[in-house]
Image (cartoon, rainbow, N blue to C red):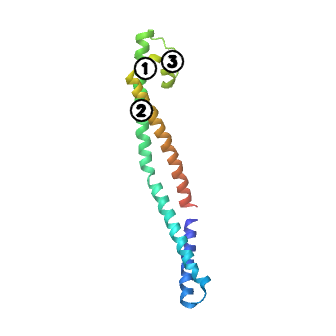
Amino acid sequence: MLIIILIFSIILIAIGIWCNHVVYDDVEITISKYIGGFILSTSILIILGGSAMVSQESSINEQLSYYNQINEQIEVDIQFIIDEYVEDHYNGNKKTDSTNIIIELQVYSSLKSNEGVANLLKIYTNNKAQIEELRNKKLEINTWKWWLYFG
């Protein structure tokens, strides 16, 4: 669609220039080159903006992978801490069989007050927020791709 708009604007510019050379007095016809120029410049700006947005896709994928790897490592570390805590304080009998580390930390409230665990949890939640933001950007990129290719 953007290609059609570009072609249409170039045609308008050509008509305006041709009419400017052939008919000097008709302002309504020669104004088409200005309208065409405006449409052309707007279309080019939209294409450049969309292209810039789409070019960020590979870096977003890398960032998503990075944050997911960090969170996986934090989950392993916190699970190890929880297992050690349960082994020391409850003789290996877990209060919960949850696979979610956040829920397990809620059960063992004294672990939440541990500064190291609190820092890991803070990093984990910040990374989750970043992952959500990056996924939203990725959806935006998919929308821009559609507009650039088919729009």
| Residue in the picture at 54% in, 81% down | 14
Q: Residue 128's spot in the image, x, y percent? A: 47, 36
Numbered circle sitting on residue 123: 2
Residue nearest the viewer, comparing 89 with 33:
33
Query: Which quarter of the figure has residue 22?
Result: bottom right
Q: Residue 28's spot in the image, x, y percent? A: 62, 82
Q: Nearer the viewer, mark 1 or mark 3?
A: 1
The quarter in which the N terminus is drawn is bottom right
Q: Earlier in the sequence, mark 1 or mark 3?
A: 3
Numbered circle sitting on residue 147: none
Q: For mark 1, what is the residue?
A: 113
Three-letter amino acid code of the residue under disc 3:
Val
Three-letter amino acid code of the residue under disc 1:
Ser
Distance, label 3 to label 2, CA atoms, is 20 Å
Q: Residue 75's spot in the image, x, y percent? A: 43, 28
| Residue in the picture at 41% in, 32% down | 123
Q: Residue 29's spot in the image, x, y percent? A: 60, 83
The quarter in which the C terminus is drawn is bottom right
| Residue in the picture at 43% in, 10% down | 89
Q: Marks 2 and 3: in contact by CB < 8 Å?
A: no
What kind of element bears circle 2? helix
